[in-house]
Image (spheres, grey):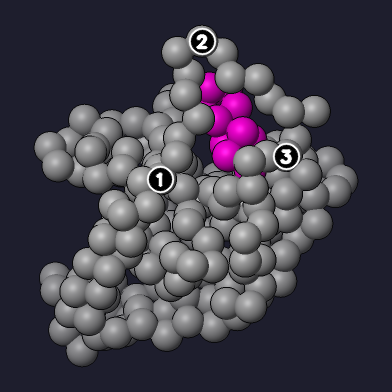
Amino acid sequence: MPVPTPPGEATPTPHPLAYSLVHALMALPVAYGGGLSVEGLEHVPPGSPAVIAGNHQLALDPFVIGYAIPSRRAQVQFMTKQEAFGWPLVGPVLCAVGAFPVDRTTHDTRAVRRAIRVLQGGGCIGIFPQGTRGGAEMHGGVALIALRARAPIVPVRVWHDSPRRRGWPGGHWHVRFGSPLAPAGSIRSLTLRWENAVAVLG
């Protein structure tokens, strides 16, 4: 059943030109970080709804994952902490590429509804189930959204060879996608399947 749009709660949509521009500009920090290797891109369904769910260690993770997927294949709209939308320059860029805020201090039903509507419209969303960089607790929101929208979860692992060195000279970015997980079972079981799938990618 389609999730209705409450008054004043627009469904986030990326601006095509802005998304392409940000996607292209990401080549600069990726190159400065030593380049990028991408594996398993065939697991990202082109033009179909999917939940891209990965680990989260560095601030650039969502941008690198988005850059790893050609925009003609999918435009990933990330669920992003609401604080980031208040940062100068960053907030407008996030809105332009279709990202939407989530309140990590509570069960943000608005963010969940928005994610489901994006998927039901054929879009692709990005989520970090850890909730924060390096978080140890796996949140069930990704499974809830996938089950409600009947969209597969594509597990992904992203890492950099030298994450603790400023500027990362001599390092290299890696993005590895795994086989899609069917939206089936309980929230707990699907969350565990995602966690195991990401662990295998490492």
- Observer able to see residue 158: no
Which one is in front, 18 or 49? 18
Image x and y of residue 55, in percent = 50, 60
Left or right, residue 138 beside residue 12 = right
Image x and y of residue 30, in percent = 26, 75
Q: Label 2, on which residue?
A: 7
Main structural element of the magenta stretch: helix, strand or loop? helix
Residue with the most extreme right position = 185
Circles 3 and 1 in contact, beta carbons < 8 Å:
no
Q: What residue type is labelled 3?
A: Ala
Q: How far apart are marks 1 and 2 (CA)?
A: 20 Å
Boundaries of the magenta span: 106-119
Left or right, residue 33 beside residue 57 = left
Residue with the most extreme top position = 7
- At x 73%, y 49%, the residue is 151
Using the image, determine if residue 183 lies above or below residue 194: above
Kindly report which numbered mark, 3 or 1, lies closer to the viewer in this rendering: 1
Q: Label 1, on which residue?
A: 14
- At x 49%, y 67%, the residue is 72
- At x 36%, y 82%, the residue is 36
Say few, some or many: other residues with alpha carbon within 10 Å of mark 2 (under 14 / 14 to 19 / 20 or more).
few
Image x and y of residue 192, in percent = 73, 53
